[in-house]
Amino acid sequence: MEVIILSGSRPIASLAADAIEALLRRKPGAVLGLATGSSPLPVYNELALRHERDGLDFSQARGFALDEYVGLPPGHPESYREVIRREFTERVNISPANVHGPDGAAEDIPGSCRAYEDAIRDAGGVDLQLLGVGTDGHIGFNEPASSLASRTRIKTLIEQTRRDNARFFGSLAEVPHHVLTQGLGTILDARHVILIATGAQKAQSVRDLVEGPVAAICPASVLQLHPHATILVDEAAASSLRLADYYRHSYDNKPSWQRL
Ligand code: F6R
């Protein structure tokens, strides 16, 4: 696990975009794992800028969303399919046919979750998975007590997460209780994961995920088992890390040949 502490969202977005750009240049048909929420938005802005300004090409790229609400009407502005379209994919030249998400309106939820896993596998697996982290330590919508080996499935949101996400909806009552999410086992299969956390409200989750035990009470701690996990945090989100100085020292002295 590499922990990189940066001064704010801009340098974090720039570093994450560098990794995605490098991936697309060496593998134009790369499979990107797409998160929603606030944390990845600066990355999507940066990628849209690089597409516009430098011609960064997404024409062969594929995308798989991490999660989706259950029960929102098709086209609801806060459905993650819509958020990803609005914030990212319609701003670059990725083909809409190459962007997939769990189907929160499926009649056969278990069957559609299995089909989603199959689609990720058939695409060759996720090359780079972007992640945020919840204030309760969730990644995707794998809430505390999720199986560390879980695959895509339905989950019930914890009230804290519903309250956190109410800012995107008109009121708490409008936030669905159920979601579909890639499992922790699914996320672990991605070749590289980049988790972004900013702000003091994430400090406890970041400490638990980086320095706590691997435990289902903090689902993000499962990333300690991932061979290539990059944790990008600002000073506020890093403020509870015991070994912050060590992470700074390691990054400042990183061999120049080592990529993210
Ligand atoms: C969203 C997702 C969630 C968010 C997390 C943090 O697709 O999977 O795990 O990343 O809830 O959300 P923000 O970034 O809004 O704080």
Image: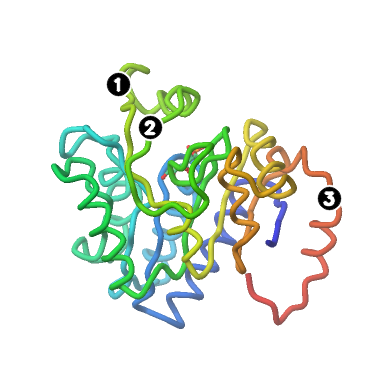
Q: Position of residue 199 (x, y in %)?
A: 63, 36
Q: Position of residue 26 (x, y in %)?
A: 46, 83
Measure the C-alpha gap from mark 2 to mark 3: 34 Å
Q: Earlier in the sequence, mark 1 or mark 3?
A: 1
In this rendering, the label closer to the viewer, 1 or 2? 2
Q: Could you tell me if the residues under marks 2 and 3 are in contact, i.e. CB atoms within 8 Å? A: no
* Picture disc at residue 215: none
| Nearer to us in this view, 79 or 90 | 79
Determine the secondary structure under disc 3.
loop
Measure the C-alpha gap from mark 1 to mark 3: 40 Å
Give the answer, above or below, for where 106 lies relative to 111: above
- Residue type highlighted by circle 2: Thr
CA neighbours of label 2 inside 10 A, class few (<14), some (14 to 19), many (20+): some
Would residue 153 be found to the left or right of residue 259 on screen? left
Q: Earlier in the sequence, mark 1 or mark 2?
A: 2
Give the answer, above or below, for where 110 lies relative to 27: above
Q: Quadrant of the image for the N terminus?
A: bottom right
- Residue type highlighted by circle 3: Leu
Residue depicted at 41% across the width and 81% down the height? 27
Residue at mark 1: 174
Q: Earlier in the sequence, mark 2 or mark 3?
A: 2
Would residue 176 be found to the left or right of residue 25 on screen? left
| Nearer to us in this view, 137 or 234 | 137
* Picture disc at residue 243: 3
* Picture disc at residue 156: 2
Residue depicted at 34% across the width and 27% down the height? 177
Determine the secondary structure under disc 1.
helix
Give the quarter of the image for residue 107.
top left
